[in-house]
Amino acid sequence: MFNFTYYTPTKVVFGRGAEERTGALVKEQGREKVLIHYGGGSVVRSGLLDRIKASLDKAGVAHIELGGVVPNPRLSLVYQGIELSRREGVDFILAVGGGSVIDSAKAIAYGLAEEADVWELYDHTRQAKACLPVGAVLTIAAAGSEMSNSSVITKDEGGVKRGYNNDICRPKFAVMNPELTATLPPYQTASGCVDILMHTMERYFTPNGTMELTDSLAEGLMRTVMKNAVALRDDPADYDARAEVMWASSLSHNGLTGCGSDGGDWACHGLEHEMGGMFDVTHGAGLAAVWGSWARYVYRDCLDRFVKFTVNVMGVEDTGAPEDIALKGIEAMEDFYRSIHMPTCFSELGIAPTQEQLETMAKMCIVAGGGKKGTAKVLYEADCLKIYEMANH
Ligand code: NZQ
Ligand code: ZN
């Protein structure tokens, strides 16, 4: 195992009615004026936005609002949010929505704290020294941004999707009422479950640095998410299943399932971010569509971990050659994805990249990774291209 720092400063308020405490939570932060940031309208239709505003009013906290965040959130709206907040003297950003809204809120918070262009962070040409405080009222269990140190933004020109990680953007609080996710379309619920799984799988499939306790937590989390993803496919109103995946979304990406490892593989996320940037696909579905091809390309280089995953997570019997066991695990995972109506290749995802587009994505993936990607098997541009080609049917 490797040394690690585990830092989770986010106060979690979980359960039915939790959103009623939002105003008091902002007040606790000693803040005066809030930008309420939200997406394309689901929080307006559900009445959540009005309830949040009422909660802020009750706590005596002034607020303005900016909606319009789209999935794969855009830099242009971040700039608008920075300008508006600066003009209005905003000192706290409240995200009401999913990963896209929270990531956009984090980007606005970075942009407000320093004069320089916020895109430089995502372009990795400088590090942030400051960030305004952010809070989150979560409406979809998926990205884990409500507790993570990460923010992913897409630059409008050229569809360049890039992430920036820094502990200073971790939300001060996360309000999580599983009931708020009941209005999600089934496709978003399932995509969210894939993303939650993948945040732990990215950390699990690495040959470098493992811990028995971390593995047990990771395996338990993965089994729980799969079981409850199926439960939600069959009954979207199942509160307990919604609660299980919502809590898993946070624990899967707050660092817990990576303690002691080298940080994880993250190749699938790198591969998907290019697909999201170029084709605007839903993040979790994009991960499902590329995972099987990645796994088949790398499993021999990380065989022990694939065997362990197959037996402990997928429940496949430990008989036969390790290669065969690993392949059975990959097949079982793809069967699971299909069972919750998630894609396992590009045509099922609804995209048909040309060879030139595959080559562009492979090149950009490696540029974003700083020259290489992954630890299960270290990937270079030609490897990424091969994986995209394997998925492109
Ligand atoms: O915009 P609205 O109208 O709210 O609709 C959203 C959106 O269309 C809808 N939705 C959300 N909650 C709902 C709802 N519809 C009905 N009822 C509700 N309760 O769902 C759609 C997807 O929302 P989005 O915020 O995009 O989902 P998600 O949480 O999956 O976030 C995806 C983004 O997060 C990034 C992804 O790359 C992607 O850009 N990620 C962020 C990470 C992080 N910051 O730590 C890590 C992840 O790996 C990921 O990369
Ligand atoms: Zn993700």
Image: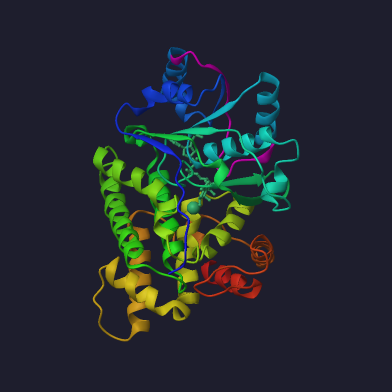
Which residue appears at 38% of the width and 78% of the height?
304
Image point (34%, 76%), residue name: 307
The colour scheme is rainbow
The answer to which of 287 and 306 lies nearer the viewer is 306
Answer left or right for 3 relative to 356: left
Residue 109: x and y in percent read 62, 35
Quadrant in the picture for residue 388: bottom right
Asked whether residue 70 is drawn in magenta, I would say: yes
Q: Is residue 384 above or below residue 144?
A: below
The answer to whether one can see residue 138 in this image is no
Q: Please, is residue 26 above or below residue 355 in the view? A: above
Q: Quadrant of residue 364?
A: bottom right
**Residue 280 placement (x, y as % from top left):** 58, 48
Residue drawn at x 43%, y 26% as measured from the top left: 25
The reply to whether residue 63 is visible in this rendering is yes
* Label tally: 0
> Is 144 in the magenta?
no
The span picked out in magenta is 59-76
For this orientation, the residue located farthest to the bottom is: 321
Does 60 sit above or below residue 301? Answer: above
Point out the image quarter for the N terminus.
bottom left
**In the rendering, at what x and y percent does residue 266 appear?**
52, 62
Q: Residue farthest to the right?
A: 116
Residue 330 picture location, percent across and down: 38, 71
- Give the side of residue 35 with respect to residue 240, left or right: right
Left or right, 336 with reference to 27: left
**What residue is drawn where x is 57% and y is 43%?**
168
